[in-house]
Image (cartoon, rainbow, N blue to C red):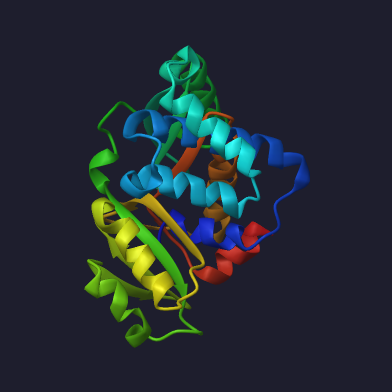
């Protein structure tokens, strides 16, 4: 099982803990605001906004909250202008490369917090460019391989998907970022149920990780994801699904 998308898929199936919902809504609101600010308030012509809204709906965010976040992004508010996207690069246990995407209104605070998490949990924060070359940004849609065959996913290829990869019980439908929305829509129109869909950084090479290291690595990733300013974490580990299930608890 390769890369952080599978770790995210496993956790996606778990119930959202009520005590963390407020923090999750805060992150989703920020993502919607920035997407609307950068690409406009119409999700039809703004794939990043469309994805952010979908994630918010999946998390049961109220419609009013979504609309306020869009309005904040498309308005002239200073709060929206103050938020910037930052990409942090580093290494985790076992030499695994890690990319951390953040949306922050205080770069110094976020940098200090991310560096602290890395250093306290067996990792190290690197310089810009130290690991980013190991990743490519792709649309990634996860489909249950026990319910569907590759023939069921032909609509995705016709809509512009680059590849359909099978990996331990799931299909991953990969696309260029510009084709992501069209590929997702084609699958939905074909009646294919999607387990998860995101624009994410995928590793071009993988680092095998044993179970003892996997536990430490997942702890580091979880703590990074729990940070209020972190929107996504990507890593180039390669570990079995059984091990991920065990360390996910």
Q: Position of residue 17 (x, y in %)?
A: 74, 48
Could you say where residue 75 lies in the image, as x and y percent from the top left?
44, 21
**Image quadrant in which the N terminus is located:** bottom left
Quarter of image, res 28:
top right
Taking depth in this image into account, of 226 and 187 the one nearest to the observer is 187
Residue 30 in sight here: no
Relative to 96, is 155 above or below? below
Q: Is residue 180 above or below residue 104?
A: below
Q: Residue furthest right?
A: 19
Which quadrant does the C terminus fall into?
Answer: bottom right
Residue, x 46% and y 81% (percent of image)? 145
Which residue corresponds to the image point at 39% horizontal and 45% vertical from the top-left? 43
157 up-or-down from 221: above or below: below
Dividing the picture into quarters, in which one does residue 209 lie?
bottom left
> What x and y, as percent, mark residue 121?
56, 36
Q: Is residue 26 visible?
A: yes
Position of residue 218 measured from the top left corner of the image (x, y, whole percent): 56, 49
Q: Nearer the viewer, residue 163 or 194?
A: 194
Answer with left or right where residue 246 lies relative to residue 116: right
In the image, what residue occupies the spot 57% across and 31% down? 68
User: How many labels were placed on the picture?
Assistant: 0
């Amino acid at each position: 099982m390769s890369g952080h998308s599978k770790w995210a898929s496993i956790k996606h199936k778990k119930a959202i803990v009520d005590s963390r919902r407020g923090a999750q809504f805060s992150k989703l609101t920020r993502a919607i605001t920035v997407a609307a600010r950068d690409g406009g308030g119409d999700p039809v012509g703004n794939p990043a906004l469309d994805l952010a809204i979908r994630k918010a709906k999946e998390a049961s965010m109220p419609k009013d909250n979504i609309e306020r976040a869009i309005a904040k992004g498309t308005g002239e508010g200073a709060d929206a202008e103050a938020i910037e996207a930052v990409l942090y690069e580093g290494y985790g246990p076992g030499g695994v490369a890690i990319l951390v995407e953040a949306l922050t209104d205080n770069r110094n605070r976020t940098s200090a917090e991310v560096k602290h998490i890395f250093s306290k949990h067996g990792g190290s924060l690197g310089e810009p460019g130290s690991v980013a070359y190991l990743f490519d940004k792709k649309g990634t849609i996860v489909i249950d391989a026990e319910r569907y065959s590759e023939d069921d996913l032909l609509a995705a290829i016709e809509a512009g998907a680059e590849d359909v990869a099978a990996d331990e019980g799931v299909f991953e439908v990969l696309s260029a970022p510009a084709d992501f929305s069209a590929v997702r829509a084609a699958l939905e129109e074909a009646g294919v149920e999607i387990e998860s869909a995101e624009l994410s950084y995928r590793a071009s090479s993988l680092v095998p990780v044993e179970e003892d290291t996997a536990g430490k690595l997942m702890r580091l990733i979880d703590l990074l994801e729990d940070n209020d300013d972190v929107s996504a974490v990507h890593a180039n580990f390669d570990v079995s699904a059984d091990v991920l299930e065990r360390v996910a608890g």
